Amino acid sequence: MPYREISGRLKVKPRLYQEKILATAAKDNTLVVLPTGLGKTLIAIMMGLLREKKGKVLLLAPTKPLVEQHAKSIETSTGIVPVVLSGKIPRSKRLKLWESADWIVATPQTVQNDLLRGQKLNEVSLLVFDEAHRAVGEYAYVYIAQKYKDDAINSQVLALTASPGKDQEKIKEIMNNLFIKNVEIRTEADADVRPYVGNKMITWLEVKLSDEYKQFTSKIKNVLRKYVRALKQMDLLGTANLNRIRKMDLIEIQKGAEDPDAMSYSAAAIKCMHALEMAETQSIEAYGAYLKKLETDRSRAARELLVQLPPPTKNMEHPKMTRLMGLIKKSAKDGQIIVFSHFRHQGKEIVSALEAKGVSAQVFVGQREGMSQKQQKATIDAFKREEFQVLVSTSVGEEGIDIPSVKLIVFYEPVPSSIRLIQRKGRLRGGGKVKILATSGTKEQAYLYSSRRREWNMIQTLRSMRPGGKILVRTPKGQKVLGSFIPQGVEVIIDDREFDLAKRLEGATTQRLLIGDIIISDRIAIERKTAADFVNSIVDGRLFKQMTKLQELYDNPLLLIEGNDLYTHRAVHPNAIRGALASLVINKGVPVIFTKDLDETADFIKVLAVRETKEGRSPSVKTPKASNLKQQQEFLVASLPGINLVLARRLLEAFSSPINIFRATTKELSGVEGVGPKKAKTLARVLSTKNEE
């Protein structure tokens, strides 16, 4: 083991997994993926001790506070005092320090600037890239790695990160940019890591807006809808449905628009979407602060919006703030707390609210947000000394900086990024709780599923990139891996509105279904409901109608209820819910399946689909029999690609009969609300192309 060569030089004893990773890293350029707080820096230090006889050791970190933190770790672990280089040191002095130093810790921007002026890396025997997920695009790491490859006589690269990215393409880009050969990954579930991480309980807390709050946000939506519809009428958007429009779509329109109106409408829609996000997911105060910012914007879009958007309403608190105050009050006696808030203004609002309740708190933001490195260091040091109880941080607190271990971390909003999710959780080092607040009925609900799925995909991708290309999962002796039971690809048909589920089922096809949500075979179809939707469907009478229609078409209809909170929705007595379940099972003979979340739902569907495939059965979409001519026409039009029953009725209302729809031009079809240019082109192609083509 390489550790034996340097054991006498270290003042701390490494853990077994660190020694194992070191053994791999010593052989070739290696990417080390290890959760925050589990000692990536010590692995780099041990590598430095192995390589220092062959040349200089250079460790790069993105920020000056991180650079100083690593320098301190090197001194504490080995007694070696490294040279710290930053842009504040004059270049002439940096050159002298470089010549005399054996160990150097620096920011990549500083090293890149010196390389551009003729500095060489030929004497460096080990180059460490901390927070290696940054090594993409034009970031300085990419240029430095290439120069190191060109200059160095005896080179070795070690890259460190808690999360390199969500997909194989991103990970390969990082590895190619840093000339990485090996990957070493550990998660908190690995046997050799588990004893050091403690138990982390992660809970997603859904908060619901009051009716008054919803009325306020609906006014903002009405303004947004006006601009979205205008863009749709100009054939620049395929839909006017606010739930299906991404900010990225609007940005692309704005970039490519030549029409002044299109540019103004898209700009207004982007600004309005941000205003809606502030109100729905942050607070009325954050919304008001954004309106004040718009007052300084002289664009046509901003001027129009200020006239139309509702003014902030006083004395209307976002339920997140109420929930947050309750969480902190409940956990105050357990120790210090970190709250992550994406927006600086909201962070300040949280601090003000906490101080008003007698809780000591300070905000922690980046340099771009107005906090100098000196102020950042002073804030973290004060938090370490327990001079205040709650640290409210923007994204600057996610990456690398040595924030003390706490027992509670609260996300004021979910983050869709797997990197940010992993880094935030990493602040919880010795076990504890993570609470993630999300506003019901907004895009925040999708963010948590997205980040968790991306984290899982990242882990599987990295494991598959190990030698041999196999997914390696440590399991107790005699225990089979879950993957051996569940195949990756399955043949099922899913309603195209079940997008989050379809993403989890490789091989599944999507189309608009009139009856049911998932078609497993010619005899099995599933109606999927979240716990909340199940309760709502009892109240509004949908449930038994839906299951009756499903029974008419399929021999084995199933009801799948997803979630563990069945008895906490609306003012419905638990016995009413139990009675509905009993009636489904006993009176109608419908099996009811319960799953805890979307991932478990996907796994159940995979197993069911495999059973049907083995019996030679395949999914078959069946449509209900029409009871009259009107329904026959509706079902006929609804069978067209991308057309549901609602759109079929709109098309029939616009064109009077199916034959007129079939003869309509693309432009005429796209004039119907909800169809749009893209869908209209598909319809025209399906209806006009000869069958042999």
Image (tube, helix red, strand yellow):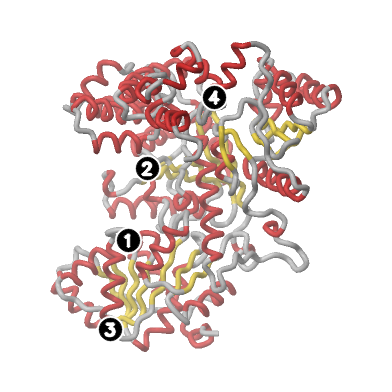
What residue is pinned by disc 3?
123
Above or below: residue 246 compared with residue 172: above
User: Tag 1 or tag 3, which sits nearer the N-term?
Assistant: 1
Question: Which quadrant would residue 403 be assigned to in this image?
Answer: bottom left
**In the rendered view, does 176 fall on the left or right side of 185?**
left
Mark 2 and mark 3 lie on one chain; the one further toward the N terminus is: 3
Residue 124, picture quadrant: bottom left
Neighbourhood count class around disc 2 (C-alpha, 10 Å): few under 14, some 14–19, many 20 upward: many
- Whole-number angstrom distance, CA of label 1 to CA of label 2: 21 Å
Q: Which residue matches tag 4?
A: 644
Amino acid type, residue under disc 1 in the picture: Pro
Q: Which mark is residue 649?
A: none
Instruction: Identify the residue position indicated by label 1 in the image.
Output: 62
Q: Judging from the image, what secondary structure is the residue with disc 1 in?
A: loop
Sequence order check: which comes first, mark 1 or mark 2?
1
Q: Amino acid at mark 3?
A: Glu
Label 1 with label 2: CB-CB less than 8 Å: no
Which one is earlier in the sequence, the residue at label 1 or at label 4? 1
Q: Earlier in the sequence, mark 4 or mark 2?
A: 2
**Residue 576: where, in percent of width, then height?**
77, 19
| Closer-to-camera residue (331/112) | 112
